[in-house]
C-alpha cells in the first residue's frame, strides 16, 4: 500500500472514529462526505461498513487500554491516586464517547462470532485486573484474592453505573437528569466517594 492509499485509509478511519464515538450510527454516505472520499473507497479499504466499525472499536479499545496501563505503572502516583485517576479517566472516556457501548452491542449482535476487542483488552484483561487488584491490596493491606476480586468488581460496576443511568434517563425519561456527570466537579466527587466507600 503506497503513502497516498495509507493516507486515504487513515483519513477514513479517523473520521469514522470521531463521528461514531460521539454520534453513534453514521451512514457510509455521511462518512464518505466528511472524509472527502467516495463510497467505493470505504468498501475498497475496509470491505464493508461492519469491518470499518470493528476497526473503530479496536481503536477505542487500545486507547482505553493504554491510558489504564500508564496509570497503573506510574511511579508518580500513590496507590489511592492511581485508582482515583483510573476511575475519573474511565468515566470521562465513556462520557466523551457515549456511542461506544451501543457500537459494541451492535457489532456483537450482527456477528455472533465477534468478541469485541474492548471486552478482551479491558474487561477480561488479566494484566490490568492484576495491577488494579494489587493496587487495591496495597491500600487496604490485604492479599485476600477473593476480597480483592470483589472490590475490583465493585469499582468497575461503580464506573458503569452512572453511564447506564445516563443512557436510561436520556432514552426513557422526560425529566432532567438526576446527576450531571458532564460536570467535571460532580464526576470527581462521585469517583472519590466511590473509591473511599469501596476501600473503607
Image: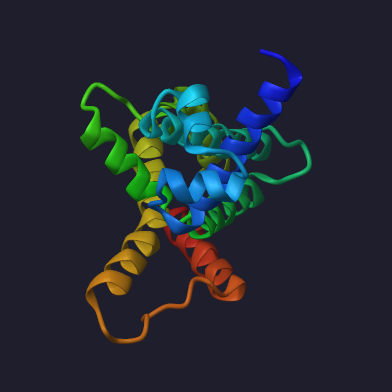
- Where is 139 relative to 178, above or below? above
* Residue ID at (56%, 32%): 62
* Residue ID at (22%, 73%): 172
In this rendered view, identify the residue nearer to me: 30 or 108.
Answer: 30
- Can I make out residue 15 in this image? yes
- Where is 144 relative to 173, above or below? above
Left or right position of 98 against 70: left
In this rendered view, identify the residue nearer to me: 53 or 46.
Answer: 46
Farthest residue, direction bottom: 175
* Residue ID at (30%, 24%): 114
Q: Position of residue 109 (x, y in %)?
A: 21, 36
In this rendered view, identify the residue nearer to me: 30 or 78.
Answer: 30
Farthest residue, direction right: 76
Q: Quadrant of residue 152?
A: top left
In this rendered view, identify the residue nearer to me: 68 or 99.
Answer: 99
Figure quadrant of the N terminus: top right
Q: Position of residue 110 (x, y in %)?
A: 23, 34
Left or right position of 77 against 89: right
What colour scheme has been applied to the protein in the rendered image? Answer: rainbow
Amino acid at each position: 500500500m503506497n503513502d497516498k492509499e495509507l493516507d486515504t485509509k487513515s483519513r477514513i478511519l479517523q473520521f469514522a472514529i470521531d463521528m461514531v464515538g460521539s454520534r453513534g450510527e453514521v451512514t457510509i454516505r455521511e462518512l464518505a462526505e466528511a472524509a472527502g472520499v467516495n463510497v467505493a473507497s470505504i468498501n475498497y479499504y475496509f470491505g464493508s461498513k461492519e469491518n470499518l466499525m470493528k476497526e473503530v472499536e479496536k481503536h477505542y479499545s487500545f486507547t482505553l487500554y493504554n491510558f489504564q496501563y500508564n496509570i497503573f505503572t506510574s511511579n508518580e502516583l500513590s496507590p489511592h491516586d492511581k485508582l482515583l485517576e483510573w476511575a475519573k479517566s474511565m468515566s470521562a472516556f465513556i462520557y466523551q464517547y457515549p456511542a461506544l457501548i451501543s457500537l459494541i452491542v451492535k457489532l456483537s449482535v450482527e456477528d455472533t462470532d465477534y468478541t469485541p476487542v474492548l471486552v478482551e483488552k479491558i474487561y477480561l484483561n488479566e494484566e490490568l485486573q492484576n495491577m488494579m487488584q494489587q493496587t487495591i491490596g496495597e491500600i487496604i493491606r490485604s492479599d485476600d484474592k477473593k476480597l480483592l476480586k470483589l472490590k475490583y468488581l465493585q469499582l468497575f460496576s461503580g464506573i458503569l453505573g452512572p453511564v447506564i443511568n445516563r443512557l436510561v434517563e436520556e432514552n426513557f425519561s422526560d425529566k432532567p437528569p438526576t446527576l450531571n456527570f458532564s460536570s467535571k466537579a460532580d464526576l470527581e466527587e462521585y469517583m472519590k466517594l466511590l473509591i473511599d466507600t469501596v476501600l473503607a
